[in-house]
Image (cartoon, grey):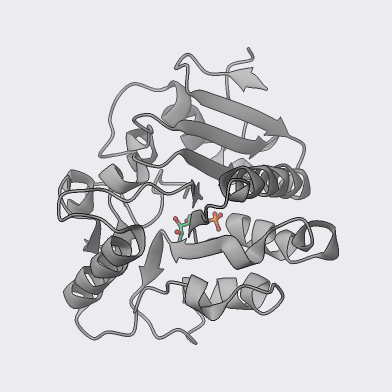
Amino acid sequence: MARMKEVSTDIARCIDLADVSRYAAEEFVRLANEATGSGGRFTVALSGGSTPKALYTLLATDTFRVRIPWEKVHLFWGDERCVPPDHADSNYRMVRESLLNHAPIPKENIYRILGEDSDPGKAATSYESTLRESFGLTPTQLPRFDLVLLGMGDDGHTASLFPHTAALSEMQRLVVANYVEKFGTHRLTLTIPVINHAAQVVFLISGGSKAAVLKEVLEGKDDPHRLPSRLIHPVTGKLLYIIDQAAGQELSQV
Ligand code: 6PG
C-alpha cells in the first residue's frame, strides 16, 4: 500500500472494481468487528454511486455477510437525493436493493434521510436531529462515525459536496440541503466537519474516467472549492483511498 505524503492518508492500489470491492469489504469486516468487539456499535455513513454499490452487493454475499455482526451495525447515509425512497435515483433504494434486503440488519438500525420531504431544508434539519439523538450529542458536538464511505465524481465531488456549492463553506451544521446548479435541484449531504470528524474515511474509486481528477485531488495544488474531495482530511481519523489501476493510472509512481 503506497503511503501519501500526509501521514494519515493511505492508498490501496487494486486491480479492478471487483478487487476494490473485495479490499473494501475486508476493511468493513475488520472495522465492524473492531468497533463491536468490546460491546459497542458500528456506525457507518453510506455513499451513493455505482462504485460503493458494488461493495454493498459484495457485503450481502455469503462470503462476507456471515462475518459481520449486523445486529450492532447502524447505517446512515452521507447524502441523499430529494426524491422518495422508492425513486430510481434514491440512494436509500440503492442500498435497500443491494444490501438491506439481503442482510439481517434490524430496522431500528437504519437511519434514512427523508428525501421525499418537499422542503429540503426541513429534511436536512430532521436528519441533524436524527444524528444528534442517535449519537447522544449536545448542540455543539459532531457525530463521530466509525466509517464514512465515499465515492468521487469525475468533477471531484464527493457525497453531495459539488464544486463551488454553498455546502463547501458550511462549518457549523451537520447536514445541509445543498443547491446544485447543474442538476437544478437540492441534494441532502453531510457537511465537511462531520465527514472529517470520522474515525475512518474510505474513498472507493474505480475507472479511467476518474484518473485525471484523482491525480489533481491527490497530487494537485490546493483549489478545494473546485475539487471538493480535497477538503476531506479526517482531523484525528484515518483516510484511505481504495482505487483500481484505471483510476490510478495518472498518479506519480511511488
Ligand atoms: C451520489 C454519491 C456520489 C457518488 C459519486 C461517485 O449520491 O451519487 O454520493 O458522491 O459517490 O458520484 O459515483 P460513481 O462511483 O458511480 O462514479
Q: x, y (%) of residue 80?
A: 39, 69
Q: Residue furthest right?
A: 63
Q: Is residue 36 left or right of residue 130?
A: right
Q: Residue at x 28, y 30 (%)?
A: 223
Quadrant in which the N terminus appears: top right
Give x and y (percent) for residue 88. Answer: 51, 81
Measuring 53% from the left and 79% from the top, which residue is drawn there? 107
Can you say whether 194 is above or below 133 in the image? above
| Residue 220 position in % (x across, y down) | 40, 23
Residue 252 vertical position relative to residue 25 in the rendered view, above or below: above
Task: Evaluate whether residue 8 shows in this view.
Answer: yes
Name the residue nearer the viewer: 93 or 245. Answer: 93
- From this view, report whether residue 34 is shown above or below residue 234: below
Q: Residue at x 25, y 39 (%)?
A: 225
At x 43%, y 29%, the residue is 216
**Residue 184 in view (yes/no):** no
In the shown orientation, is residue 98 left or right of residue 7? Answer: right
- Residue 253 sits in quarter: top right
- State how many labels appear: 0
- Image quarter where the C terminus lies is top right
Q: Nearer the viewer, residue 5 or 216?
A: 5
Which residue is at the front of the view, 139 or 245? Answer: 139
Q: Position of residue 43 (x, y in %)?
A: 49, 55
